[in-house]
Image (cartoon, coloured by chain):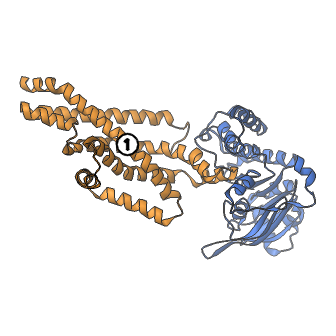
Chain colours: A orange, B blue
Amino acid sequence: MTKGWTAIMDGFSYMLEGAWVNLVVVLGALGFGFALGLPMALVQVYSRSAFLRKCIGAYVWFFRGIPLLVCLFLFYFGLFEYLGWNLSAFAVGVIVLGLISAAYQSQILRGAILAVSEGQMKAGRALGLSDGQTIRLVVLPQALRMAIPGWSNEYSILLKDSAVTYALGVSELMARAHHVASRTYQHLYLYVTAGLLFMTMTWIGTRLLRSLQERLTIPGFSK
Amino acid sequence: MNDVASFDHSLPILDISHVTKRYGGMVILDDVSLSIRRGEIKVLIGPSGAGKSTLLQSVNFLVKPDSGTIRLEGKPVDASSKQALCRYRQQVGMIFQDFNLFDHLTALGNVELGLVHVKKIRRNEARDRAMQELERVGLADRAHHYPAQLSGGQKQRVSIARALAMDPKVMLLDEPTSALDPELIGEVHAVITRLGEAGMTMILATHQIGYARNLANEVVFMENGRILEQGPPEKILEHAELERTRAFCSRIADARG
């Protein structure tokens, strides 16, 4: 009992720093995934080029079909090694999680864009707005609001996935819990602590997104 | 106003000639031609599926016609040029059956959007202008309400204000009161009537025959993608030449009691 608590107390700030690493990986991946996923969604919905749409489809199919661990190894020990890029495990973690997240976010955003009624586009065009302006000023402000619940889900998935970067040697929460446990032999206590920290981060993140969603709700509008 | 001087009033302000539209194997518009002079009000009537809505949407290329020409003040519209199309659409106001207000913007924001982003007017001037348009449709007190907080009639009046803010030369109204509760139709009709009195050129598709009679200079009867008959309201609504037109008008009149 006391040994367990001591191990937690001694290792806590070390593990908390690890949790911070997870959070940075997740925010980086979410941002990178959004920057990549939004144009992908726009292409899938609006592009007249069947080839481009198929390319996006293939991208999504690829990243949805491969286990995260395989993907991490494929890029870290495989592709980047082959290309001679000397990237840190942390950077590869952000990139790979971001690439995967782009596949999922593109589908979240695609659904949200399609949920905005076609009449909105027509009304924008009828006013003399270009298609680009209509998408930017009319469709996206509504679609992005509708995407928040999907993002919340994506955040919690990414957060848990970020623990897998441990396998590349990223010094994140799980790696640190394991490190402390292997020295103190208090595995149960330390993994429970790690689990609770992940849960707390999930809870805080989804709460923040929920309150963002509430703040951005269009008055009187329910979808 | 300056182009009024250079524009011959005997010529149509808007000329639709030989417009055809097919969807799959169906012919929705079959070689439709229609001209409208400045200040004239034409009302399109006809059964659902006659092509009224498709015709109006083809006029500002929300539906791309397969063939045919649209001329505004004598100049053919080049729909292949995006810029020309945007410039043209500014001059042709469109009112939709289901309003299509931008749901994420207030009434004021809806009216302001085109002024700021199409007409490139500075935001505070745009705000003043948008407010004037809302006053014109009697909704200044609803300026900061979102569409979901407005009644159907109010939404349609905001959408009219939004179109008017662009200073259109012609207004196309696609069954503007069909989605409204009966008690809300009057307020929208009142706004449209005032527009007509102010000299606005309009093409209105409607099932409200009684209203059409009072408003229209000419009633146009459409069926199966073709204009079958057109003429003064009394003639078309009461003494139409074609049996089809008479049958349609009497059925509508019966239904309205």
Instruction: Tell me the quarter of the image containing the N terminus of chain A.
Output: top left
Q: Residue furthest front?
A: A84
Residue closer to the observer: B151 or A175: A175
Q: Is residue A149 left or right of residue B216?
A: left
Does residue B245 appear left or right of residue A212 in this picture? right
Q: Nearer the viewer, residue B238 or B68?
A: B68
Mark 1 highlights which residue? A30
Q: Nearer the viewer, residue B178 or A183?
A: A183
Q: Please say whether residue A202 is visible from this viewpoint.
A: no
Rendered residue at 47%/45% (across/down) = A146
Look at 37% across and 42% down and name the residue there: A30
From what the image shows, is residue A147 above or below residue B40? above
In percent of width and height, residue A44 lies at 48, 58
Relative to A176, B44 lies left or right? right
Residue B197 visible in the picture: yes
| Chain ID, mark 1 | A
Counting labels gives 1
Does residue A26 lie above or below B42 as drawn?
above
How far from the left and from the top, in percent, is residue A54? Answer: 43, 64
Amino acid type at circle 1 is Leu
Q: Tell me if B152 is positioned left or right of A206 in this view.
A: right
Instruction: Name which quarter of the figure residue B102 lies in.
Output: top right
Crowd tier of the residue under label 1, counting other residues whose Cα lies within 10 Å: few below 14, some 14–19, many 20 or above? many
Q: Residue at x 54, y 41 (%)?
A: A221
Q: Can you give x and y, in whole percent of width and height, for residue B85 in the image?
A: 71, 57
